[in-house]
Structure formats: structure tokens, C-alpha cells
């Protein structure tokens, strides 16, 4: 156990249950250690990359560690591949655990009193969902809980439960998520499977109009319904910006996302497209251009070899 600095702010990922769980647990930890409520901020990846980091001290969770965060007084709890080696910040890092699980372990290490069996249960479900442990017996329940943040969004959900993390367990809205999964996912899978569009030899676009896009893409990958090694879905965020979500089975998703200035996990990654991309057709054109294999320009030969090449070309 190490001594934690008092944070000026707690910063987490806005887009999923893991960031939600991490933020609420870290706020609880700060309250326990310093007896005051620390400001919580939640950020989408693209906006986070533009945010100035001016605080003297901060706790950050579920946002990939990079050089910007390597600051004295900063603690980063994360499970994405680290983009730099920490020299000044304290990095709590484990790619086999979700950020929420790492935050839960910190709470227990520092003796936070209000960490119960119910807390451990929601942390476990978040861990299963975020790491996409599809063979886990609670995988479907985990996906239902994760869908709450995707459907109702971070701050709406926070207000709805009054910041009480454990009240997510068996919340009436979980039944809505179960029903949507049972009804929408099979319909969406059948529709999407017929409309897969190859963008390159390695990457395909999967349109999704209904159902859990992650689950639909997972089923298509598992059934090898396309020769593509990376499957990509697109969504429009408030304000009109287009985001891409990428999935694979052998680590190709992250490499592809990095070509789009994004990041994530080896088989689950994402990227925000430039603001000049205003719609799905524009996005598909942009992706084809950006992800197209770079053509190899033949080296021009000189001397006798060049003369023979020119002569050869003239005979064709």
C-alpha cells in the first residue's frame, strides 16, 4: 500500500460502466481519506486528449496513461496499454483487470468502510463486461449492467441513482436491458450480417440499427461470417462527431485504431473521426482512404539497369 495524495479532481472515462464504477469508487475513497467531496469529471477520449492538465494533483482512471499525465501528485489507475513509462506520476496498472477492479482493490487496501458484498458484485460485473469475458457465467448479466451507461449516459445515470453505485444491482432498468437483449439482438444480428461492407482486405464496416453493437460484432467475429480481421461500427455523438468502435480476435483492433489516432485494448478499441467527417457515408470514404494499404512506389533504377528497364517497357 502507498500513500495517496489528496486530489484536486478525479478524472474518468465517460463512455462505459468501467469509468462509471471507477469514478464513484475513487470519490468514495477520497471522502474516506480526506473527509471531503472531490470534484468528479467524466470525459470522452477525444475531448480528454484536448483537456489542459493544470491541476497539481489528480486521480485518473480508465484513461490510457500517457506522457501528459506523468506529473508529480498524479495517480493513474488503468488497464489499457500504457503509452509511456511513468517517471513522476504513480501508475497502478494491470491489463488483466478493469480499472474499476483496480479502484476497488485500492478502496479495500485503504480501509474504506462502505465497501460491501454488493460493491464487489457490481465491480465483478463491470470487470466481466469491460474485458468482454464472453465465457464467464455472468457475461449476459454483465452486458445488461454495462448497457445502462451506454443507454442512459454517465451523468443521467449518476443522478438517477444518487451516486449510490450498489443501487445499480437489480435496478428496474436492468429488466429493460434484458428485454432489449432478448428481442433486439437477434433481429439486429440478422440485419447486420447481410450488410457487412468491406473497407479494406482486413477491415469491414458492420452497420447496426438495433441491438447491442458489441454483442452483434462479437457474434459475427465468432462465426467468421466475413474474411475481415477487424470489424468496425460507427456512431454519431452529440454535436455530430462520428466515432468508430473496432473489434478483433487476435489483437488487430488496437493497431487499426491507432492509425485513426485512437486507442484502447488489443481486441477492443475506438477512435473519434475528424470533425470534417459529417456523416456515415463521409466516414466510410474517410476510412477507406485512411486505412488503405500504402502503395509501394518502385525505386527508379539508373545506369544500365535503368536503360534495360526502359527498353523492356517499350516492348510491352
Image: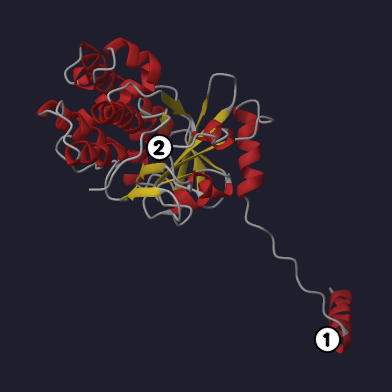
Q: How is the image coloured?
A: secondary structure
- Pointer 2: residues within 10 angstroms few (<14), some, or many (20+)? many
Residue at left 34%, top 11%? Answer: 159
| Above or below 72: residue 250 | below
Residue with the most extreme bottom position: 304
Q: Earlier in the sequence, mark 2 or mark 1?
A: 2
Residue sitting nearer the eye, 152 or 47:
47
| Above or below 48: residue 85 | below
Residue 309, position as x, y percentages in the image: 84, 80
* Visible residue check, residue 139: no
Q: Is residue 125 left or right of residue 27?
A: left
Q: Is residue 266 left or right of residue 305?
A: left
- Pointer 1: residues within 10 angstroms few (<14), some, or many (20+)? few
Q: Which residue is mark 2?
A: 60
Residue sitting nearer the eye, 14 or 188:
14
Residue at left 14%, top 38%? Answer: 137
* Residue 305 - label: 1
Of badges 2 and 1, the one in the foreground is: 2
Residue at left 69%, top 30%? Answer: 276
**Spatial CA span between label 2 and label 1:** 60 Å
Amino acid at each position: 500500500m502507498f500513500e495517496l495524495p489528496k486530489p484536486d479532481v478525479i478524472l474518468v472515462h465517460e463512455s462505459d460502466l468501467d469509468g462509471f464504477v471507477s469514478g464513484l469508487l475513487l470519490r468514495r475513497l477520497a471522502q474516506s481519506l480526506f473527509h471531503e467531496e472531490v470534484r468528479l469529471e467524466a470525459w470522452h477520449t477525444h475531448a480528454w486528449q484536448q483537456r489542459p492538465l493544470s491541476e497539481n494533483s489528480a486521480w485518473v482512471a480508465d484513461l490510457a496513461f500517457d506522457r501528459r499525465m506523468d506529473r508529480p501528485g498524479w495517480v493513474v489507475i488503468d488497464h489499457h496499454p500504457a503509452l509511456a513509462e511513468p517517471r513522476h506520476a504513480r501508475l497502478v496498472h494491470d491489463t488483466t483487470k478493469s480499472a474499476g477492479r483496480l479502484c476497488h482493490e485500492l478502496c479495500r487496501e485503504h480501509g474504506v468502510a462502505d465497501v460491501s458484498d454488493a460493491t464487489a458484485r457490481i465491480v465483478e460485473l463491470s470487470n466481466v463486461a469491460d474485458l468482454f469475458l464472453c465465457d464467464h457465467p455472468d457475461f449476459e448479466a454483465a452486458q445488461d449492467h454495462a448497457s445502462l451507461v451506454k443507454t442512459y449516459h454517465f451523468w443521467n445515470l449518476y443522478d438517477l441513482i444518487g451516486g449510490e453505485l450498489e443501487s445499480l444491482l437489480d435496478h428496474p432498468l436492468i429488466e429493460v436491458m434484458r428485454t432489449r437483449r432478448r428481442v433486439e439482438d437477434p433481429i439486429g444480428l440478422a440485419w447486420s450480417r447481410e450488410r457487412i461492407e468491406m473497407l479494406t482486405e482486413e477491415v469491414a464496416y458492420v452497420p447496426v440499427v438495433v441491438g447491442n453493437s458489441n454483442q452483434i460484432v462479437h457474434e459475427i467475429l465468432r462465426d467468421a461470417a466475413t474474411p475481415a480481421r477487424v470489424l468496425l461500427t460507427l456512431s454519431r455523438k452529440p454535436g455530430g462527431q462520428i466515432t468508430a468502435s473496432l473489434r478483433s480476435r487476435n489483437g488487430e483492433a488496437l493497431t487499426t485504431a491507432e492509425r485513426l489516432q485512437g486507442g484502447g485494448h488489443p481486441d477492443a478499441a475506438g477512435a473519434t473521426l475528424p470533425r470534417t467527417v459529417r456523416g456515415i457515408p463521409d466516414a466510410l470514404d474517410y476510412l477507406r482512404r485512411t486505412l488503405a494499404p500504402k502503395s509501394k512506389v518502385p525505386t527508379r533504377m539508373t545506369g544500365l539497369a535503368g536503360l534495360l528497364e526502359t527498353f523492356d517497357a517499350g516492348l510491352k
